[in-house]
């Protein structure tokens, strides 16, 4: 069994796996799934929330149903990678709604972004007016996704922990 977080036992991992499949499950049903009574289940759940292991609950919305089916991945190279420049870039990126994900990368470029828009023409505007004007951007390279083969916002079975 994989255990990445010290202090989390098999039951904690089972709680996380069940919640990643159904975040709206009742305490009674969660308790049945993990084999505990309601009180210890609720205490464990509160502890996982309090220690930051569970950061919140949300509705997962299908972006395709909203017409947001154009996905582009963008490599971003910065002209300055000192901490102040990275902080300025990070703060500016947070304000652009079309950017779904941003990762600082160790490689031939500095950041990898996932951008979701309605169309190629909308993406072109986002690239020109928003991404290219971010602080310290020296250049970008775009890769357009043709199909999402696997796209899951949850952690799924948490690395196979059951």
Image: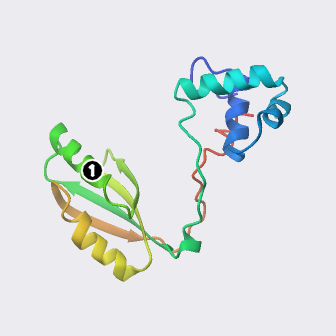
Quarter-wise, where is residue 13 in the image?
top right
Quadrant in the picture for the C terminus: top right
- Residue 69 visible: yes
Q: Is residue 148 above or below residue 158?
A: below
Q: Is residue 156 above or below residue 47?
A: below
The residue identified by callout 1 is 110
What is the residue that sits farthest to the bottom in this orientation?
A: 121
Q: Position of residue 45 (x, y in %)?
A: 67, 27
Quarter-wise, where is residue 33 in the image?
top right
On screen, residue 92 versus residue 26, left or right, reads left
Mark 1 nearby-residue class (10 Å; few <14, some 14–19, many ≥20): some
Q: Is residue 64 above or below residue 97?
A: below
Q: Position of residue 40 (x, y in %)?
A: 76, 19
Q: Position of residue 117 (x, y in %)?
A: 42, 72
Near-viewer residue (85 or 24): 24
On screen, residue 125 versus residue 51, left or right, reads left
What is the residue that sits farthest to the top in this orientation?
A: 7
- Residue 3 visible: no
Q: Position of residue 46 (x, y in %)?
A: 63, 25
On screen, residue 93 versus residue 134, left or right, reads right
> Residue shown at 20%/63% (left/top)?
139
For numbered disc 1, what is the local secondary structure? Answer: loop
> Residue shown at 83%/37% (left/top)?
29
Quarter-wise, where is residue 8 in the image?
top right
Q: Is residue 60 above or below residue 9?
A: below
Near-viewer residue (88 or 148): 88
């Amino acid at each position: 069994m994989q255990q990445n977080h010290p202090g989390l036992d098999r039951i904690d991992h089972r709680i996380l796996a069940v919640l990643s499949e159904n975040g709206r499950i009742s305490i009674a049903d969660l308790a049945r799934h993990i084999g505990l009574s309601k009180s210890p289940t609720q205490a464990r759940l509160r502890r996982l929330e309090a220690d930051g292991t569970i950061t919140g609950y949300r509705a997962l919305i299908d972006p395709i149903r909203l017409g947001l089916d154009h996905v582009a991945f963008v490599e971003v190279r910065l002209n300055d990678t000192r901490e102040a420049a990275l902080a300025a870039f990070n703060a500016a990126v947070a304000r652009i709604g079309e950017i779904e994900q941003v990762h600082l990368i160790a490689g031939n470029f500095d950041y990898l972004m996932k951008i979701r828009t309605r169309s190629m023409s909308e993406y072109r505007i986002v690239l020109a007016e928003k991404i290219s004007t971010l602080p310290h951007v020296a250049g970008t390279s775009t890769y357009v996704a043709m199909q999402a083969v696997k796209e899951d916002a949850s952690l799924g079975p948490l690395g196979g922990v059951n």
